[in-house]
Amino acid sequence: MSERIPVIIDCDPGCDDTAALLLAFRCPELDIRGITTVSGNVALDKTTRNALRVCETIGTGVPVSAGAVKPMFCEPVYAPHVHGEDGLQGIPLPEPQKQVTGKHAWDAIYQEAVAQDGKLEIIAVGPLTNLGIALAKYNDLAKRIRRIVIMGGAAAGGNVTPCAEFNIYVDPEAADIVFKSGIPLCVCGLDVTLKAYLTADELREIGALGTPQAKLFEAVTSQNCEKRFCPQGAPLHDPAAVLYAAGDGIFSVQRCWMRVETSGTITRGKTVTDCYSDAQKEPNVTLVLDVDRKKFAARVKEIMARY
Ligand code: RIB
Ligand code: CA
């Protein structure tokens, strides 16, 4: 295996974030240096508590650093209708023994970027507030991050408004900072994540692996509340970004230009791209558009069987 990739996972657990963390810690390609939490699916205190509880269920001592309590310039938007009031659909997990590091997420990201000497990658599966703040605070950070793999946005469609996906919609200004940063970006938007689903039978097979981690994976993913978007099963938005970051060749990508609309009254939070346009601009993202779903499902099960 080639050199392991040093990563920080920035997340807002969140049911699919939990599934993503469960997978990430059994991907040998990833050297997880830290977890950072952000306000998103639920408030920061809940996403942070959930990250700590999930890390203890996984059995990892990787440091968890809490980040932004709200978006950079607007009020928080939460998704309790998808993730439950506590962010994990009330699924019982023991209270965490470990605590957060006490560092702000943006400082933890910068310090690890310096320590990794330009090799650090970020897997960002929540609103991009922590990264926006980090880039605003540290003007040398952009050149120190090798790549950001983002679960967010969409070339077409949305899940909060007709044209905006949740992670971008919650903090468009932070996303705009990230998309203009010049850091190599890989965007796993709804275009691919709604295709990266597991069927009820496939989820049951994972639960039947019988470990606490496999049962948690099934529990957090089987409550698919997006039947209209994805009637075939449970879309694994955040896990798709993790598998992409781990280097799975099961995805199809296209280089294109993409920026975030921050001012439109109707289009605020939309990721605007030239992917389907003749008005081509200088590409700044690798947009992930498709996945071999059966291989994706098989890979998820293979990874979860490692617990
Ligand atoms: O739109 C899906 C994304 O928003 C996922 O990251 C989910 O966890 C929520 O944060
Ligand atoms: Ca998320």
Image (cartoon, helix red, strand yellow):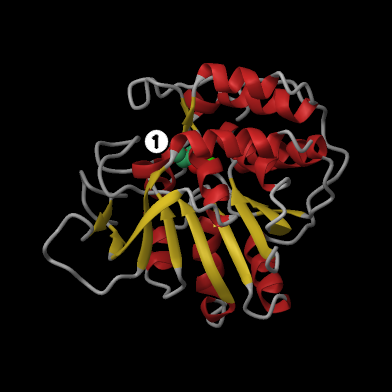
What kind of element bears circle 1?
loop
Mark 1 vs ligand 1: CB under 8 Å?
Answer: no
In the displayed structure, 175 sits above or below 47; it is below
Q: Nearer the viewer, residue 88 or 239?
A: 239
In the image, is residue 279 above or below residue 294? below
The location of residue 120, given as percent across then percent down, is: 63, 70
Q: Quadrant of residue 195?
A: top left
Q: Give the residue displayed 37% in from the left and 71% down from the top.
A: 180
Closer to us: 93 or 102:
93
Give the amino acid type for the residue marked by disc 1 in the picture: Lys
| Residue pointed to by mark 1 | 195
Give the side of residue 302 with respect to residue 183, left or right.
right
Of residues 231 and 175, the one drawn nearer to the viewer in this rendering: 231
Residue at the outermost right position: 97
Image quarter hosting the N terminus? bottom right
Q: Residue at x 68, y 57 (%)?
A: 30
Which quadrant of the rendered structure holds the C terminus? top right
Tell me if residue 77 can be seen.
Answer: no
Counting from the top left corner in percent of width and height, residue 154 is at 32, 47
Q: Which residue is at 57% across, 73% downward?
A: 145
Q: Residue furthest left?
A: 278
Residue 86, by quadrant, is top right
